[in-house]
Image (cartoon, rainbow, N blue to C red):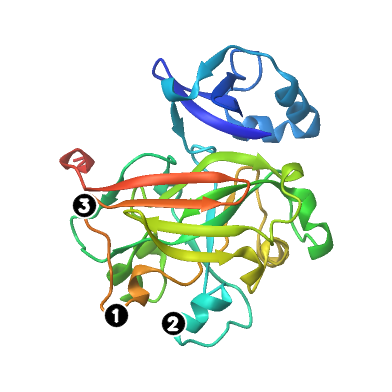
Amino acid sequence: MKLVTFLHDGAARSGRLDGDAVVDLAAAGLPGSTSALLAGGTEMLARAGAADGPRHALDAVTLLAPVLRPPKILAVGLNYRDHIEETGLDTPKVPMIFNKQSTAAHGPYQPVHLPRVSSKLDYEGELGFVIGRRCRHVPRERAHEVIAGYTVCNDVSVRDWQMRSQTFTMGKSFDTHSPFGPALVTADEIADPHALGLKTWVNGELRQDSNTRNLVFDCYDLVAHLSTAFTLEVGDLIVTGTPSGVGIGFDPKRFLVAGDRVKIAIDGLGHIDNEVIAEPDSTTLI
């Protein structure tokens, strides 16, 4: 099942992607948010899969982030063997975890902002997964039980802000810099999340071409590691790292500029496609 959040008549609603249509789950009497659907457990998800609500043409609605405001967005650095080779750095002994603020969450086809304060904007195509059960101290062999589903992510990075501080938080958390979607594909539809092709194009040029089999720490490793320290909650988004081919890895470096389009596709999950625009004046809120 492919769960989505969509905008229709000015309201965000939960839906199920069905070919070129979106089934309106909220109108069928189910919870209006993906997080609430996931919190209802297997029984609620079964109802969502069987619900026969009103259908909207996909091109008549706007898809938003599948989870509008994840409680946590947690990401991993240096987690693809080919990316580590590209950087010339050592392979981490434990996952290199950082967080992106939840306000960075953004829709799969909405524009990404080129910040006023930097020209060093970069893309990172990544596999993401969403937690479906509140959990702590999850052993690796049971990690699959708490993963609700998988999604396509772009860990957009402002490289100078990322590198000039001791943590990555500032350079990874600008508004609009965590687009993901187009759907949350439930885990039962993905036979092996660690054998998925991942590709990223910038303006139609293939920049990243890898496979999740190249992950150093896979999805189950990450669940076990993170849940050792803190509780994972329903709706948390875990972004698993990027392969080689990011803009900062080129010589000369190939940062994004206004007007660029970044498309990221993962086998079985669909694609996201975001245009880069200059940060608008409307972001000033004082």
Precedes in sequence: disc 1 or disc 2:
2
Residue underneath mark 1: 251
Residue found at the far left of this picture = 281
Pick the front one: 225 or 136: 225
How crowded is the residue under tag 2: few (<14 C-alpha within 10 Å), some, or many (20+)? few
Classify 151 as above or below 19: below
> Is residue 236 something that shows in the picture?
yes
Query: Residue at image x 44%, y 58%?
Result: 200
Q: CA distance from mark 1 to mark 2?
A: 12 Å
* Residue contact at pointers 1 and 2, CB within 8 angstroms: no
Please, what is the three-letter code of the amino acid marked with disc 2?
Thr
In this picture, residue 110 sits left or right of residue 134: left
Image quarter in which the N terminus is found? top right
Query: Residue at image x 47%, y 72%?
Result: 244
Classify 244 as above or below 280: below
Pick the front one: 254 or 110: 254
The percent position of residue 16, horizontal first and vertical second, equals 62, 27
Residue underneath mark 2: 87
Please, what is the three-letter code of the amino acid marked with disc 1?
Asp
Classify 173 as above or below 30: below
Residue underneath mark 3: 258
Please, what is the three-letter code of the amino acid marked with disc 3?
Ala
